[in-house]
Amino acid sequence: MTDFSLTPDELAGFQKNGFAGPFPLYEHDDITQAWRRERIRLMDRSDAVYQDEAAKSGATNIANYDRHLDNAFLADHICSPQIVDRVSSILGPDVLCWRTEFFPKYPGDEGTDWHQADTFANASGTPQILWPNGSDFGGTITVWCAFTDAMVDTGCLQFIPGTHQSMNYDETKRMHYDPEQATNVEKDGVRRGFFGYDYRELQIDPDWKPDESQARSMEMPAGQFIVFWSTLMHASHPHSGLSKQMRLGFAARYVPTSVRIYPDTERIEEYGGQVSLERYGAVLVSGENAFDHNRIATETTLGHPFPTRRR
């Protein structure tokens, strides 16, 4: 069986820069056809784990968090060896996928503002992941896969290499959700927002600005993915509108089994809505889970057969 673990040089580059890739996963035509099929299937939310009224309304992105828990294609995606082997070479053998989410960018959409995430308390003020005390790490490994072409003019990701070692934001502060005022704001000549928030409200130094002269644009054709620490300074370009194609990224987030996921909370509260975690479960994608502090996805918790093929 092919081993897709990061090579020593790739791992050293990851530790230095905070990201690795892009890497191939799907042929361009294959993912294009697959997404045409799956986007129709995903319209059926009858087995989706979040059935709250806020989610049903479609008013908030959390409506479509964790669709890998009811969609077989996405379930297989998060467990693909090309992804899991590389993530495990960073995090160790025992790994959970704790969240997935879609990141669409339509023609004319603003860019996503520069940000970092350690505990993911940035929107609600409540930590969503907590590493063990004394850990040298924080944040999560994000695997961002291009389901459509992600180019500069359609809003590809941007990274500032090497910024993952220190946080410029205090996630214990609270951002104020106001989609009318926090979107389509021009910042240093670029239209950037953060899904109805102004991420600058979390800055430790209110006068600090990211050094965009060091930024790298991460263009990827459909079917490629990139691996990065969530504590890496990252953003995205605006969609210029020159192309009529939506840019769609699918992000899967991974942590070791020792990390506590959604500790001491029963709901996710973000982006003007909330959903219950009653049917939520993290997915063991590699190794074993020797801990009992996390909800783990099972057929009992989901209420339907679990589509993911365990490795």
Image (cartoon, rainbow, N blue to C red):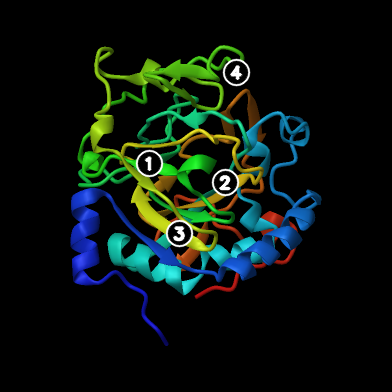
- The numbered mark, 1 or 4, whose residue comes first in the sequence reads 1
Label 3 near label 2: C-beta < 8 Å?
no
Q: Disc 2 to disc 4, how far (Cα)?
A: 19 Å
Which mark identifies residue 225? 3
Q: Nearer the viewer, mark 1 or mark 2?
A: 1
Residue 130 visible within the image = no
Residue at the image position 79 percent from the left and 49 percent from the top:
43
Residue 190's place in the image compared with 102, above or below, is above
Q: Disc 2 to disc 3, how far (Cα)?
A: 14 Å
Q: Which residue is mark 2?
A: 101
Q: Nearer the viewer, mark 2 or mark 3?
A: 3
Label 3 near label 1: C-beta < 8 Å?
no
- The numbered mark, 2 or 4, whose residue comes first in the sequence reads 2
**Residue 141, horizontal then vertical, whole percent:** 38, 52
Assign a secondary structure to mark 4. loop
Residue 135's place in the image compared with 168, above or below, is below
- The numbered mark, 1 or 2, whose residue comes first in the sequence reads 2
Are there few (<14), some (14-19), or many (20+) residues within 10 Å of tag 4?
some
- The numbered mark, 1 or 3, whose residue comes first in the sequence reads 1
Q: Which residue is mark 1?
A: 158
Which mark identifies residue 97? none
Q: Disc 1 to disc 4, how far (Cα)?
A: 23 Å
**Residue 171, horizontal then vertical, whole percent:** 36, 26
Q: Disc 1 to disc 2, how far (Cα)?
A: 18 Å
